[in-house]
Image: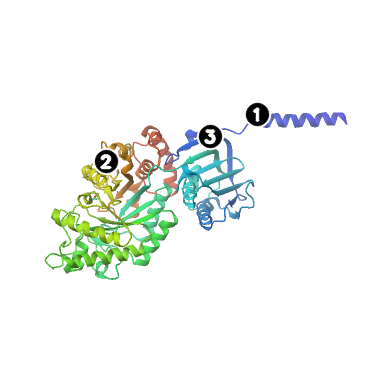
């Protein structure tokens, strides 16, 4: 009897010794590769494994938080093949769970979040469901890249133990897609929005009209689309969004906490409208439809009253369709509009935008007009205009063409794209900071960062992907992360690790020689 007891105790002791010899390993933070880099990360020990028993728990009765949890399930269920159930409150400390909690923590603001991972639980804390949605994007990146595949993958789905506290630097973080020079259908646009969401961007700017095509149905001016929407660069059929399709895009973006900013470019870049309605022309004669790529040759008749009836109708319909607070009125490169006429036009259009309760956004040239406080100028080319807009108490979005125009070629061998602002390799698009780009420009006037993709040479989703990736993640990091945490020499390794994710998502990315 005694012997048996001794043997048993030895066995227990040995088992205890063995287990304490192999403590849970500390997370190696250098292997995380998160983009945008979070404000603070602390390593924990061990890992949490998502399996078929993992529960999603909501600590608050909040239907919007429930929808965010559903979005997480959508990201997890395909590759893992697991069925996830959502439970409310009851099982707060239950092991093997992903817990969502809403808190009130000033530092986190509207979009910030904490993630705590330990072997028992992943907890996500935020002030809002929006913050929880941003956290989910981080959680995706903490999982193996195969989580992004649209098929089942046999794998251990481990998340390293850690604590993250994270919130954005700038309010406005976005990208623009030009659907005028070439038209892209609703499904392509949704995929573009998915890219923005994955890197925590929160604004999607649609360039809906230009010389080559009018892309949004306006019921009071139907020829804008029946004539002006028919062509595109190169002469093929263009297309347009019905109001229902536009609403579908708005809603898709909204579910991902992305605000859609519609742009009607005026008074230049208006040939598609001028070809559709003769009365918008100074001489009352409709222009020919245009399928080339020259800029700066068209203008609305700025001193004709019918022009303001037209603008009012367009902005009224667009404002009704657009829940977000912004209407973008273009205003760039109006090279055949007299300066007095230009200012008169922008002033009147600003009043129209305000009359529908919206905030006016325009390219940096609008700084020459009599901007009312809170107007937003989008700096793309002229630093003096950014300064002027700030002097007029306008906020400024930074979209410097030399740094972050996604249609600029990477180098002289890039087949797609243009090069008028120079070549923009991945490093050049990342290694700059908005706060030091314009000497003495006060950072408090910077509303954020947005990278445009113009589509003169971009015809397919695959073309879009090639120009967007891998530059977009870096631009998202400029807009989200603290500048002191960013540097190219470490970023390039983090970005390199995202190639597996691009491949899992079937993204046609540019394999830059700058990325190890
Ligand atoms: C622009 O690139 N014309 C804003």
Residue 40 in view, yes or no:
yes
Q: How many marks?
A: 3
Nearer the observer: mark 3 or 1; the answer is: 3
Going from N to C along the chain, the mark reached first, 2 or 1, is 1
- What residue is rendered at 30% in x and 65% in y? 316
* Alpha carbon separation for disc pair 2 and 1: 54 Å
Residue under circle 1? Answer: 21
Q: Kindly indicate the quadrant of the structure image that contains residue 471.
A: top left
Left/right of residue 118 with respect to residue 431 in the rendered view = right
Going from N to C along the chain, the mark reached first, 3 or 1, is 1
Nearer the observer: mark 2 or 3; the answer is: 3
Residue under circle 2? Answer: 411
- What residue is rendered at 35% in x and 54% in y? 461
Is the C terminus in the top left, top right, bottom left or bottom right quadrant? top left
Q: Kindly indicate the quadrant of the structure image that contains residue 62.
A: bottom right
Q: Look at the numbered disc 3 and give the secondary structure of its residue.
A: strand
Q: What percent of the width, then of the height, locates residue 502?
A: 42, 46
Q: Which mark is residue 506?
A: none
Q: Is residue 16 above or below residue 88?
A: above
* Alpha carbon separation for disc pair 2 and 3: 39 Å
Residue 416 in view, yes or no:
no
Residue under circle 3? Answer: 43
* Alpha carbon separation for disc pair 3 and 1: 20 Å
Q: As rendered, which of 234 and 107 lies closer to the eye?
A: 107
Left/right of residue 267 with respect to residue 58 in the rendered view = left
Q: Look at the numbered disc 1 and give the secondary structure of its residue.
A: helix
Badge 1: residue crowd in 10 Å (few <14, some 14–19, many ≥20): few
Q: What percent of the width, then of the height, locates residue 119?
A: 60, 40
Q: What percent of the width, then of the height, locates residue 77?
A: 54, 53
């Amino acid at each position: 009897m005694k012997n048996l007891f001794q043997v048993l105790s030895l066995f227990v002791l040995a088992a205890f010794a063995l287990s304490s010899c192999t403590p849970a390993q500390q997370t190696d933070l250098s292997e995380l590769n998160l983009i945008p880099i979070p404000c603070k990360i602390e390593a924990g020990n061990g890992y949490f494994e998502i399996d078929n028993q993992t529960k999603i728990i909501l600590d608050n009765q909040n239907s919007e938080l429930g929808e965010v949890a559903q979005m997480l399930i959508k990201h997890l269920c395909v590759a893992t093949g697991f069925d996830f159930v959502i439970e409310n409150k009851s099982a707060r400390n239950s092991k093997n769970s992903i817990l969502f909690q809403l808190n009130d923590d000033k530092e986190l603001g509207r979009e910030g979040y904490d993630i705590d991972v330990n072997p028992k639980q992943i907890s996500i804390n935020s002030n809002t469901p929006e913050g929880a949605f941003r956290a989910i994007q981080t959680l995706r990146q903490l999982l193996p890249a195969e989580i992004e595949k649209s098929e089942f993958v046999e794998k251990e789905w481990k998340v390293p133990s850690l604590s993250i506290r994270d919130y954005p630097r700038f309010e406005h973080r976005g990208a623009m897609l030009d659907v005028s020079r070439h038209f892209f259908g609703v499904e392509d646009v949704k995929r573009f929005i998915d890219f923005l969401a994955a890197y925590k961007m929160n604004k999607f700017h649609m360039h809906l009209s230009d010389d080559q095509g009018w892309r949004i149905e306006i019921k009071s001016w139907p020829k804008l689309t029946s004539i002006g929407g028919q062509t595109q660069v190169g002469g093929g059929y263009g297309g347009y969004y019905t109001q229902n399709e536009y609403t579908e895009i708005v809603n898709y973006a909204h579910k991902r906490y992305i605000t859609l900013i519609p742009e009607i470019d005026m008074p230049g870049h208006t040939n598609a409208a001028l070809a559709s309605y003769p009365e918008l022309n100074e001489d009352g004669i409709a222009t020919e439809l245009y399928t080339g790529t020259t800029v700066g040759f068209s203008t609305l008749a700025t001193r004709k009253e019918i022009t303001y009836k037209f603008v009012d109708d367009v902005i009224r319909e667009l404002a009704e369709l657009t829940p977000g607070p912004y209407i973008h009125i273009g205003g760039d490169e109006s090279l055949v509009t007299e300066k007095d006429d230009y200012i008169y036009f922008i002033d009147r259009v600003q009043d129209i935008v305000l009359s529908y309760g919206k905030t006016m956004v325009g390219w940096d040239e609008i700084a020459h007009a009599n901007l009312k406080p809170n107007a937003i100028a989008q700096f793309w080319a002229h630093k003096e205009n950014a300064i002027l807009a700030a002097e007029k108490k306008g906020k400024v979005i930074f979209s410097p063409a030399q740094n972050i125009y996604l249609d600029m070629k990477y180098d002289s061998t890039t087949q797609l794209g243009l090069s008028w602002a120079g070549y923009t390799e991945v490093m050049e698009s990342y290694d700059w900071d908005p706060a030091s780009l314009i000497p003495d420009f006060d950072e408090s006037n910077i509303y954020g960062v947005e990278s445009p993709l113009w589509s003169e040479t971009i015809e397919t989703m695959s073309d879009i992907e090639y120009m967007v990736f891998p530059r977009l993640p870096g631009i998202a990091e400029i807009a989200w992360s603290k500048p002191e945490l960013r540097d190219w020499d470490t970023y390039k390794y983090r970005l390199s690790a995202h190639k597996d994710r691009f491949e899992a998502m079937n993204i046609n990315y540019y394999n830059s020689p700058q990325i190890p």
